[in-house]
Image (cartoon, helix red, strand yellow):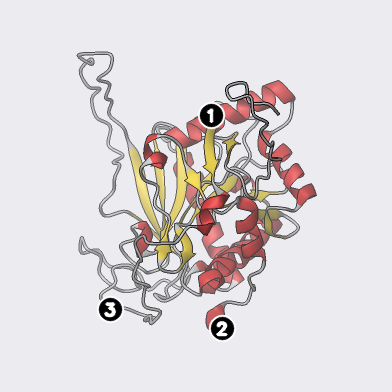
Amino acid sequence: MCDRRTGKETQITVFDPGNHPHRRLNPLTREWVLVSPHRTKRPWQGQTETSPSDVRLTYDPKCYLCPGNARAEGKQNPRYEHTFVFDNDFSALLPDPVCRGRPAPHSLLQAEPVRGVCRVVCFSPRHDLTLAEMSVPDIRHVVDAWVEQTLDLGAKDFVHYVQVFENRGAMMGCSNPHPHCQVWATEQIPNEPAIEAASQQEYLEKHGRSLLTEYLHGEWLSRERLVCANDHWVALVPFWAAWPFETMLIPRRAVASLPDLNDTEQDALAEILKRLTTRYDNLFEVSFPYSMGWHQEPTDGEGYPGWILHAHFYPPLLRSASIRKFMVGFEMLAEPQRDITPEQAAERLREQSEKHYREG
């Protein structure tokens, strides 16, 4: 090809997504992700984290989530045997109605009162466990709790969305290592689910098919980004993943929320959660940090025919247990960026054993 400015012949390089920088579209959020695989060859001189201690107590008398202990506000935990749910003692949202605020002094200065409920779900009475190290039957108790909380909170007339999420590890801001997650029920549909709802509805109207059902079909055929699967669930690294070892859990039957899962699908969910989180831990032989959350159909009664239930896992680790990915600079001011490709990340996760490294 001739360069019009210089008159010289230039060589055209065939695009290779495994080696050349490129962008990928996330159809759920309608955002682009910059992928720069050639950067994996650069020397690392960034921050190194201190690896967390792998010595854990089965019971910690100072832990406010362990059975029988007192919480920060003085309430006593029961001596629970499986899961335990309670209203967060320091809730970010309150259920009490308040008067509507004054009109905004300017159209750019909008504020409104909001109601909600925040709960904590303890996964196990054992202080030293994680999902990866719990038994499948015990994880099923966690799945049951997610379903029960979605039904209970979603039935409240002022709740329009139920967000189940887990922050695992101090690196993700978790203040207590006892295995637990949170459930926040909000009066408004939050930003991310609202964007996903619009994207899924638009795709359904345009193509007559659900976005994630169509996406999962293509991923199942290629197998390039699949991590593990069973008869009812698929765990994969999304084509548009922003975090180095980001994954999604998608049901193979089109369901909109956790309560829509039948008994067999809930059993299968417990099984694949253990398999996926075990692979995470085995990758760097560490209790793998992440933020995980379920995106399910809003509970505002409007109906979302294009919505497919799914979970996102966002782990920060990049090259080892002590080197993390930071979303800063270009990522904060422009668009997300990653180095290793989603295909490379999926391959590394597929290579991991499903027997936890601590069992050895």
Q: Is residue 204 above or below residue 248?
A: above
Within-10-Å neighbours for mark 1: few <14, some 14–19, many 20+: few
Quarter of the image for residue 211 reads: top right
Q: Mark 3 or 1, which is nearer the eye?
A: 3
- In the picture, which quadrant includes the N terminus? top right
Q: Which residue is mark 1?
A: 301
What is the residue that sits farthest to the bottom in this orientation? 360
Quarter of the image for residue 208 reads: top right
Q: Which mark is residue 359?
A: 2
Residue that appears at 57% across and 42% down: 21
Q: Which mark is residue 320?
A: none
Instruction: Please state which amino acid type lies under the numbered disc 2.
Output: Glu
Instruction: Please state which amino acid type lies under the numbered disc 1.
Output: Gly
Q: Is residue 220 above or below residue 42?
A: above
Q: Position of residue 221 (x, y in %)?
A: 80, 48
Q: Mark 2 or 3, which is nearer the eye?
A: 2
Q: Position of residue 314 (x, y in %)?
A: 49, 53
Q: CA distance from mark 3 to mark 1?
A: 44 Å
- Dot 2 or dot 3: first in sequence order is 3
Residue that appears at 36% across and 60% down: 46
Asked if the residue at tag 3 contacts the one at tag 2, i.e. Cβ–Cβ closer than 8 Å, the answer is no
Q: Which mark is residue 61?
A: 3
What is the residue that sits farthest to the right in this orientation? 221
Residue that appears at 40% across and 31% down: 188
- In the picture, which quadrant includes the C terminus? bottom right
Q: Is residue 309 left or right of residue 323?
A: right
- Dot 1 or dot 2: first in sequence order is 1
Helix, strand or loop under label 1: loop
Q: Position of residue 309 (x, y in %)?
A: 61, 43
Instruction: Please state which amino acid type lies under the numbered disc 3.
Output: Pro
Q: CA distance from mark 1 to mark 2?
A: 46 Å
